[in-house]
Image (tube, rainbow, N blue to C red):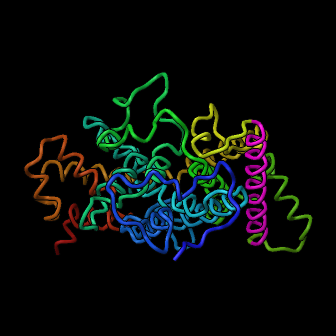
Amino acid sequence: MTPDIPEKRALFATRWEDSRGRFIEEPESATRTPFQRDRDRIIHASAFRRLKQKTQVFVAHEGDHYRTRLTHSLEVAQIARSVARTLGLDEDLAEAMALAHDLGHPPFGHAGEDQLDECMAAFDGFDHNAQTLRVVTKLEDRYPTFPGLNLTWEMLEGLVKHNGPLITADNSVTDLPAAFRDFPWLEDLELDQFAGPEAQVAALADDIAYNNHDIDDGIAAGLFTIEDLLELPLVGDIFRSVQADYPALSREKVVYEAVRRLIGHWIDDLTAETRRRVAEHKPDSAAAVRAMPVPLVAFSDELERDQRALRAFLYERMYKHYKVNRMRSQAKRILSELFELFMAEPETLPDLWRRDAEQATAVRRARLVCDYLAGMTDNYAIDLHRRLFSMESML
């Protein structure tokens, strides 16, 4: 049976027929392309399921209507797939990349990442992108013949380089986070080049999703109002256009419609600028895209300026709001105290982790404890901290 794939593909698209394969060989599927299998393995991974209770901005227990890492990843995947289809790229690879891009995030969002990096300062640090690689190549231990998910070369290089080349004139492999360096085939991923076009699409789909959906969540949480947004370039224009088109529309629907239009504007700009770069650089393969001196997939300079203004606003009015800072403070305290406890008393770890931690060097123990904490959901970390540090839980 031949896999069902679109007939029209751009010259510079990643071709599943030319995939460089998997580092550990296994039989191909008769019904799915290699990238469809990658997507399916991600969806079935326990790390993917746990994203449902991991913070995007608000801690998961703050309310059911705010976005979590899981709902965010699904929204990124939808945008990435739509853009990939428009540009003639491999939709399955773009979708898989989007679904997997946050698998390495610890509980409590960026507050959790900052705290784990602080806890691991003496042990090579913590980086959520490197942790994603660790999750898909090691920690998802569910198959009998290989560790991790054994994803394709294209998936792994995209996850590692979706933000750009890792190796530049200013650094080397030894400067990369430990979780990257631990991967035995890391240098085979062509670290000095850009990622393939589908990975670039997924990376900017992430920007589109979180910029615009944070507007929705921030208003819903009462951190700012529609009126506060009217002074921003582009965002203010879109909100005013909705109000002009629908004067009697409820404020809630004004937000929904404005966010919908903003996402559409971001996508239109991305596809237009990418097509302009295709015409300029004329890449004739995915390899040519990787070798370009600049990314192929990009926003226009004008949209980048508007995006910077929005990000500055969100940083001040949302990410640094005192309500969010209080959650950050609690989250960092929880992870710090759990880390210190498990390092000092590894016998308090679950058996699966304890056996290795008790016999490990300090560096190895720290990485095991970090893996354990990074895999937790917000709710699990909160509950575990309560049970370990509150005498009331013993009564």
Comparing 133 with 339, the one in front is 133
| Apparent side of residue 80 relative to residue 133 in the rendered image (left or right) | right
Report the magenta stretch's main SS.
helix
Counting from the top left corner in percent of width and height, residue 200 is at: 60, 48
The answer to whether residue 390 is above or below residue 104 is below
Comparing 42 with 252, the one in front is 42
Counting from the top left corner in percent of width and height, residue 33 is at: 50, 66
The answer to whether residue 340 is above or below residue 62 is above
State the extent of the magenta-drawn residues as a range.
Answer: 253-280
**Residue lying furthest top:** 169
Q: What residue is drawn where x is 16% and y is 72%?
A: 394
Image quarter hosting the C terminus:
bottom left
Magenta stretch: residue 255 in it?
yes
Residue 334 visible, this angle: no
Q: What residue is drawn where x is 29% and y is 43%?
A: 184
Residue 226 lies in what quarter of the image? bottom right
Comparing 245 with 21, the one in front is 21
Residue 118 lies in what quarter of the image? top left
Magenta stretch: residue 300 in it?
no
Residue 317 visible, this angle: yes
The answer to whether residue 132 is above or below residue 78 is above
| Apparent side of residue 189 relative to residue 382 in the rendered image (left or right) | right
Residue 28 lies in what quarter of the image? bottom left
